[in-house]
């Protein structure tokens, strides 16, 4: 899948599942539950033990299916290269890292670095970022997207952190290109209730589609 196809796909589906877990086994179970619930854009964070190997396994497992596996919490270009070699189709970072952005552009892999201020957004855009991750989203209200889009209408924004079923539609209505959701989506893993994750994924998909 080409870089532009992935960026377009993110804008069409509008929701990226951010996967954090305490073990490789838990991470795999969470991903399976999320995909079963209808969310097909997966950001496996590199804070998960054995994340690089998990990405390889997921890419192989979902080969030929309509699921896109990316890497999250990528802090530097070295780790970014490992993620890309493992098969990650997009890379997400919580902050601006010029070397990481350059690396992803070199290999035509979508890069979504984090930002909190207009200056950080501009720095990311000037470096060649594809989508700007507004993080942490719960530090703002959804109106921040409209505020950013005022002087920067060319920016594509994806709030992450504090995005829930209850406010997902509001984020999108104020101009978010997509939303990223983690703990709100996967909280069922805390009690081993992976069916609850599947049901929450279905609610997220319904909330996003209702906004169309």
Image (cartoon, rainbow, N blue to C red):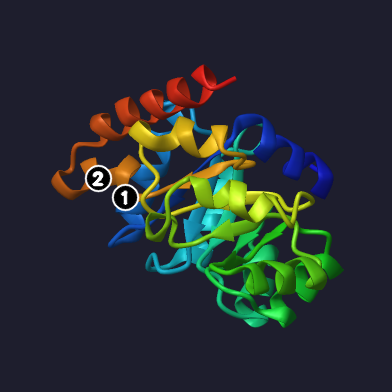
Tags 2 and 1 in contact by the CB under 8 Å rule?
yes
Residue pictured at 47% horizontal, 30% vertical:
169
Question: Does 116 sit above or below residue 137?
Answer: below
Percent of width and height locating residue 51 = 47, 64
**Up-down relation of residue 140 to residue 121 (above or below):** above
Taking depth in this image into account, of 14 and 117 the one nearest to the observer is: 117
Q: Is residue 170 left or right of residue 147?
A: left
Q: Residue at x 59, y 35 (%)?
A: 14
What is the C-alpha distance between the residues marked 2 and 1?
5 Å
- Mark number for residue 183? 1
Residue 51 in view (yes/no) = yes
Could you tell me residue 93's position as x and y percent?
A: 57, 67
> Image check: 107 left or right of 22?
right
Q: Residue at x 76, y 67 (%)?
A: 104
Secondary structure of the residue carrying tag 2 is: helix
The dot on residue 48 is none
Crowding near the residue tagged with mark 1, few <14, some 14–19, many ≥20 C-alpha atoms within 10 Å: some
**Height in image: 80 above or below 11?**
below
For mark 2, what is the residue?
187
Report the quarter where the C terminus lies: top right
| Quarter of the view holding residue 81 | bottom right
114, 80: nearer the viewer? 114
């Amino acid at each position: 899948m080409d870089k532009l196809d992935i960026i377009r796909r993110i804008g069409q589906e509008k929701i990226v599942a951010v996967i954090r877990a305490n073990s490789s086994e838990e991470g795999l179970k969470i991903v399976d539950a999320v995909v079963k619930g209808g969310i097909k854009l997966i950001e496996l964070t590199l804070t998960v033990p054995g994340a690089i190997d998990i990405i390889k396994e997921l890419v192989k497992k979902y080969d030929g299916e309509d699921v896109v596996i990316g890497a999250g919490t990528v802090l530097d270009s070295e780790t970014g290269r490992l993620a890309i070699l493992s098969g990650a189709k997009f890379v997400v970072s919580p902050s601006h890292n010029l070397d990481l952005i350059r690396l992803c552009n070199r290999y035509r892999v979508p890069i979504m670095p984090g930002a909190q201020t207009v200056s950080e957004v501009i720095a990311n855009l000037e470096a060649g970022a594809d989508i700007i991750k507004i993080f942490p989203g719960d530090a703002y209200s959804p109106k921040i997207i409209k505020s950013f889009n005022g002087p920067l209408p060319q920016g594509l924004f994806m709030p992450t952190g504090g995005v829930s079923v209850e406010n997902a539609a509001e984020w999108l209505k104020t101009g978010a290109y997509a939303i990223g959701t983690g703990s709100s989506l996967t909280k069922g893993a805390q009690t081993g209730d992976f069916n609850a994750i599947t049901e929450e994924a279905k609610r997220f998909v319904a909330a996003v589609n209702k906004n169309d």
